[in-house]
Image (cartoon, rainbow, N blue to C red):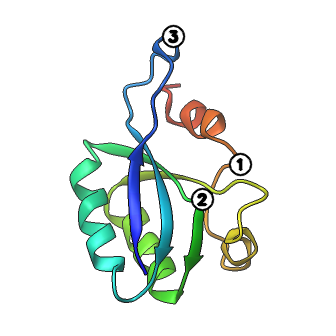
Amino acid sequence: MDFQIRPVELPAASGSTVPAVQIHGEVDAANATDLSNALHELATPALIIDLSLVGYLDSAGFAMIDRLLDEIQVVLVVSPDSVIRPAAELINLPFYDSLAEARTSMEPA
């Protein structure tokens, strides 16, 4: 199992300075630590993580995401059609439906 981290380009007009990435592929016990380390490096100081295209996320992957939420400023996106959405809802993972909603949540009040 393997994953890829791809940057998400923000529209110039958005004014957002928070980087956003999409995770593609599969995350399990074998690679969850590698993904966590990579995401920590990208969070300067915050990060939007879109998990919508993750095809598989096991309990080690969900535990890693839960720890990230405690350690760094992270906002998650899990689209309504994502295969991991039912599990994310079941464990009450805080997430937004879209990148646009996630970006709005990161804007100063």
Q: Mark 1 or 2 closer to N-term?
A: 2
Quadrant of residue 68 within the rendered picture: bottom left
Judge by depth and name the residue closer to the eye, 3 or 100.
3
Residue 1 drawn above or below residue 6? below
Q: Write down the residue under mark 1.
A: 97
* Mark 1 or mark 3, earlier in chain: 3
Helix, strand or loop at mark 3: helix
Q: Quick check: 75 above or below 64?
A: above
Residue at image location 60% in from the left, 59% down from the top? 53
Residue type at tag 3: Ala
Identify the secondary structure beneath mark 1. Answer: loop
Looking at the image, which residue is at 39% across and 89% down? 29
* Up-down relation of residue 91 to residue 73 (above or below): below
Identify residue for label 2: 53
Identified at 39% across, 60% down, the residue is 4
What is the CA distance from the residue labelled 1 to the residue labelled 2?
13 Å
Q: Is residue 99 left or right of residue 89?
A: left
Instruction: Tell me if mark 1 has few (under 14), some (14-19) or many (20+) residues whose alpha carbon lies within 10 angstroms of its own.
Output: some
Quadrant of the rendered structure where residue 64 is?
Answer: bottom left
Residue at the spot of label 3: 13
Rendered location of residue 18, percent (x, y): 39, 33
Q: Where is residue 94 in the image (x, y as percent from the top left)?
A: 61, 61
The reply, left or right, for residue 13 in relation to residue 84 is left
Q: In which quarter of the image is the N terminus?
A: bottom left
Question: Which amino acid, mark 1?
Answer: Asp
